[in-house]
Amino acid sequence: WGGEVVNSEPDGEHTSTQMGSGHFPDEGFGKASYFRNIQVVDGSNNLRAPKGLGIYTEASKCYDVQKGYNSAWGNYFYFGGPGKNEDCS
């Protein structure tokens, strides 16, 4: 699960393309994009919570991700960002 923004321009400047809603994960519900109740299908065709769920980002001032767990949403993560901005070039 996740997102990717690719900039193939040779100058190396980061793209202004937003990810998700364009809001950072710490803005939370109602602003940031999210996946919730994340599950995988096992070999017996049963839904299971994934084990060892990790997160990764290369440009956290442009885009970021935060994971969590609660009884209502199960495993979830918020993700996104505005792309190129005054803190991310």
Image (cartoon, rainbow, N blue to C red):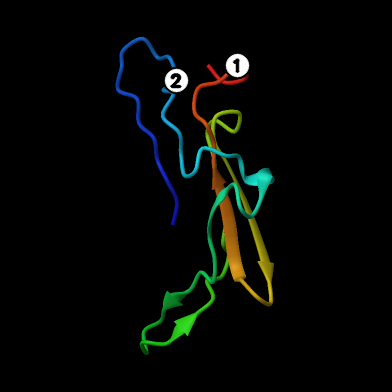
Residue behind mark 1: 86
Residue 15 lies, in percent from the top left, at 41, 23
Name the side, left or right, on which 69 lies relative to 9.
right
Q: Amino acid at mark 2?
A: His
* Residue at 30% from the left image edge and 22% from the top image edge: 8
Q: Is residue 67 visible?
A: yes
- Residue 55 in sight: no
Looking at the image, which residue is at 58% across and 47% down? 32
Marks 2 & 1, CB-CB < 8 Å contact: no
Q: Of the residues under marks 2 and 1, which one precedes in the sequence?
A: 2
Q: Residues within 10 Å of mark 2 (few under 14, many from 20)?
A: some
**From the image, which quarter does the N terminus lie in?**
bottom left
- Judging by the rendered image, the residue that carries numbered circle 2 is 14
Within-10-Å neighbours for mark 1: few <14, some 14–19, many 20+? few
Which of label 2 and label 1 is nearer to you?
1
The residue located at (61%, 40%) in the rendering is 24
- Identify the residue shown where x is 62% and y is 19%: 87
Q: Work out whether 6 lies above or below 10.
A: below
Q: Quadrant of residue 11?
A: top left
Q: Compare residues 30 and 79 and report the one nearer the observer.
A: 30
Along the horizontal axis of the image, is 16 left or right of 52? left
Location of residue 2 in the rendering, given as x and y in whole percent from the top left corner: 45, 51
Q: Determine the image quadrant of residue 17.
A: top left
Look at label 1 and name its amino acid.
Answer: Glu
Q: Which mark is residue 30?
A: none
What x and y, as percent, mark residue 64? 58, 40
Q: Position of residue 22 (x, y in %)?
A: 51, 37
Taking 78 as reference, is 12 above or below it?
Answer: above
Query: Does 89 appear above or below 55?
Result: above
